[in-house]
Image (tube, grey):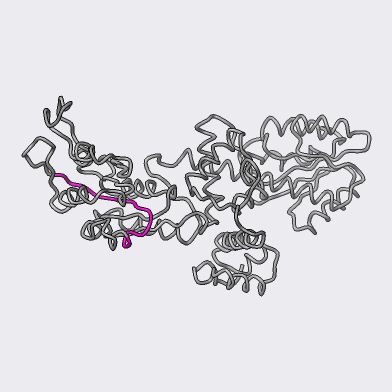
Amino acid sequence: MNATARIDNPQVIFIEDDELVRRASVQSLQLAGLAVTGYGSVETARIALDTLDDAFAGVIVSDIRLPGASGLDLLAQCHEYTPDVPVILVTGHGDISMAVQAMRDGAYDFVEKPFAADRLIDTVRRALERRRLVLENVALRRELAARDALVPRIIGRSAAIGEVRRLIANIAPTDAAVLIIGDTGAGKELVARSVHELSPRHARPFVAVNCGALPESMFESEMFGYEPGAFTGAAKRRIGKLEHASGGTVFLDEIESMPPALQVKLLRVLQEGVLERLGSNQSVNVDLRVVAAAKGDMEALVASGAFRRDLLYRLNVVTIELPPLAERREDIVPLIEHFVLAAAVRYDRPAPILTPRQRADLMARDWPGNVRELRNAADRLVLGIERAAGGPTGESAPGHSLKERVERFERATIAQALEQHGGAVSAAADELQIGKATLYEKIKRYGLAERGEAGKEGG
């Protein structure tokens, strides 16, 4: 076998020397909607087998006992050249122990003669699904390795994340101040880094400051720097974070927690582009692009007097809102698959492949910690200390009724199908195996049409 060709569509290579069994099996698989080609021996299938490579999206079904090379010989060849391609062995009654050993040696499954058509079809479909997941995993891993490590990825299929990507692409080349609104763990710093890395300032520093973690007594010295002797313990000059970020971007996280007295000092720097180190009377010019992040209602903080209106106006030339994961469930699967691959590389562990059931369970959870909680769960999955299905104890969407959980999952599943088919309702209905009228009713009920996720006909 070699890698000189590629088969892009799922395909079944069926090898059986009994012509009646071969014809009947090929016909059954074709009637089930599967692309299949039958061969009487490994030798007659050689041309097809020699085109297999790691991108082959299909499976091989072979009788164990064949004229010439046996099914076990074929399994050994596949294991050497394309080890991830599923091989299903067809056995006679006396070959079951041999087939069990073959599974230990890497065969996907075996089907015992005489077999019902449904048994063969079910086994082949499961193998094809397994192959699809493996190829998807490989593609994601390749994408992870190939992408530019400097530019963070905003991952997701939802309309909300699509709008975030559009805003970033639009405003990143400018110097417009940006205010990112979102819950804890929603990915606000990732958005800020994306704005910086896609801007003309990307070669200059990106300086992140957590305003909520910076004590008021240290704010001025950390932000503005100081000269020797400015206070007890100031033995030498220190360049502050704002001055260090000059020419680049400063990211002010949890800006809502900054005390009013310090807001005044920050506002002067942003308005005039100058600062003074503690203990110095000399002004230092700074050239900053400011990206701030907050959680909660900033207008309410302004109304209560906790935050200066003039500073808010200075910070929110452009506002980017990051909704929680519970409001964009179609983003959960692509996010956790990305995090699983990243964790597998980081821990040098194999990346587990999520089954459809596990994906459904993940989409049903509320994820109050948002993207950060999802990333931690991916780490635990790779380390083998957490199941995908509902976390360590198997809970799913605590605090919600079964009806609510089912509706949340159904809405996310429909949104994902519509996204994958470009909004084509017919194609989505075919994939979900429901009538178009039923799907239209559900689209209307869940408000998906209003979000632009449906409306195209065809498929």
Q: Is residue 135 above or below residue 382?
A: below
Residue at (63% x, 74% y) in the render = 441
442 and 457: which one is in front? 442
**In x, y percent, where is residue 298?**
32, 59
Residue at (8% x, 36% y) in the render = 280
Which quarter of the picture shows residue 403?
A: bottom right
Q: Is residue 8 visible?
A: no
**In x, y percent, where is residue 173?**
28, 53
Which quarter of the picture shows residue 70?
A: top right
Q: Is residue 289 magenta?
A: yes
170 and 67: which one is in front? 170
Residue at (37% x, 56% y) in the render = 181
Question: Which residue is the extreme one toward the front?
Answer: 304
Q: Is residue 448 magenta?
A: no
Position of the C terminus, as image quadrant, is: bottom right
**In x, y percent, where is residue 35?**
73, 54
On screen, residue 168 versus residue 245, left or right, reads: right
Position of the N terminus, as image quadrant, is: top right
Question: Which residue is the extreme one toward the left?
Answer: 281
**In x, y percent, where is residue 9?**
65, 51
10 and 215: which one is in front? 215
Q: Which residues are magenta?
A: 286-300
Image label count: 0
On screen, residue 4 versus residue 309, left or right, reads: right
Q: Is residue 200 visible?
A: yes
Q: Is residue 100 above or below residue 208?
A: above
